[in-house]
Image (spheres, grey):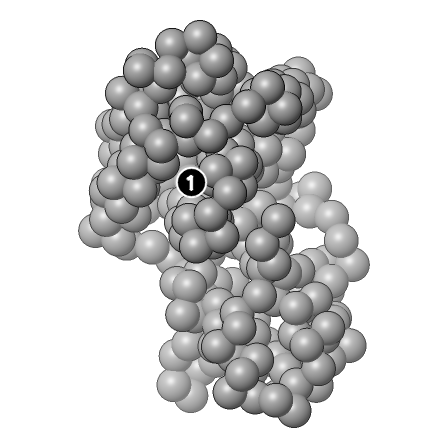
């Protein structure tokens, strides 16, 4: 699997320890994409340094890299914050997802093998398990990761990184605009997609487009955190994340 690493930041800052940079970047990226750090929360440098046991220089490199990926915003004289996508940005993200993911769906059918289908079905089982256990945090994470896994199975690192970053931004959008009990990106939808990928390859790309359009149709006009999202925060895991709520 391609590494979650911003190579540009490493090249421009050779003094940074790559292991510290990658560990911190991966940890923060995951916490944001899994909605353990909610949109708008301030990412204080001092707390970040302490939480990840890294230097201030590494911390600034990571924040700059996350800002380039649009999951963090840097405000002069105020610091870094988890991004809060506007309705316009939300619509643009989904427009981009339709362009990229539908094209990916049209191409992946020629590369996917039985082992890949098995991995997708195993992943759908994880989504089902999370939903049956009312674990909303895990349900959201596995739902988004289904799309990332599909890109991984395609075997193109550039496409993988693009989808991974788009899904991180989609997680922020979900946190703000999600409708209660909305399940259009659920395990049942993904299970149907896997069935098509295995049995009706010509129907897979159109089905992916319909899937994304159904999510987009929920709308991006109500700018508020969902009740389910606050539940996610109450059950956030990982010492590095919990530091921010103490």
Q: Is residue 171 visible?
A: no
Q: Which residue is drawn at 69% across and 47% down?
A: 236
Q: How many marks?
A: 1
Q: Can residue 208 be seen in this view?
A: yes
Few, some or many C-alpha atoms within 10 Å of disc 1 (few <14, some 14-19, many ≥20)? some
Q: Which residue is drawn at 42% across and 31% down?
A: 108
Residue 133, x across and y down, in percent: 70, 20
Q: Which residue is drawn at 26% across and 53% down?
A: 89
Q: Quadrant of the C terminus?
A: bottom right
Residue 204, x across and y down, in percent: 35, 19
> Relative to 68, does residue 233 appear above or below in the rendering?
above
| Relative side of 24 to 84, left or right | right
> Relative to 73, does residue 165 appear above or below in the rendering?
above
Residue 119, x across and y down, in percent: 63, 26
> Relative to 84, does residue 9 appear above or below in the rendering?
below
Residue 155, x across and y down, in percent: 51, 43
What residue did someone put label 1 on? 174
The quadrant holding residue 77 is bottom left
The quadrant holding residue 132 is top right
Q: Residue at x 58, y 46 (%)?
A: 34
Mark 1 lies on a secondary structure that is helix
Q: Nearer the viewer, residue 212 or 2?
A: 2
Q: Which of 54 and 207 is in front in this view?
A: 207
> Relative to 12, does residue 52 appear above or below in the rendering?
above
Residue at the top extreme of this rendering: 199
| Relative side of 78 to 49, left or right | left
């Amino acid at each position: 699997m391609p590494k979650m690493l911003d190579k540009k930041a490493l090249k421009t800052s050779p003094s940074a320890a790559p292991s510290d940079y990658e560990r911190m970047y991966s940890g923060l990226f995951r916490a944001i994409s899994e909605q353990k750090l909610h949109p708008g929360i301030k990412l204080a440098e001092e707390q970040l340094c302490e939480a990840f046991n890294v230097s201030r220089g590494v911390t600034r490199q990571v924040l700059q890299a996350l800002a380039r990926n649009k999951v963090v915003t840097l405000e002069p004289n105020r610091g870094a914050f988890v991004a809060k996508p506007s309705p316009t940005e939300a619509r643009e993200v989904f427009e981009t997802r339709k362009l990229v993911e539908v094209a990916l769906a049209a191409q992946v059918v020629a590369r996917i093998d039985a082992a890949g289908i098995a991995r997708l079905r195993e992943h759908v089982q994880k989504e089902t398990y999370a939903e049956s256990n009312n674990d909303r945090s895990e349900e959201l994470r596995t739902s988004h990761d289904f799309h990332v896994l599909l890109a991984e199975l395609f075997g193109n690192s550039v496409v993988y990184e693009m989808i991974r970053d788009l899904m991180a931004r989609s997680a922020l959008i979900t946190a703000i605009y999600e409708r209660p009990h909305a399940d259009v990106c659920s395990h049942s939808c993904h299970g149907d997609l896997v069935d098509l990928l295995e049995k009706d390859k010509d129907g897979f790309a159109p089905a992916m487009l319909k899937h994304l359009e159904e999510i987009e149709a929920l709308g991006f006009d109500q700018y508020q955190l969902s009740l389910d999202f606050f539940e996610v925060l109450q059950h956030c895991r990982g010492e590095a994340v919990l530091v921010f709520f103490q």
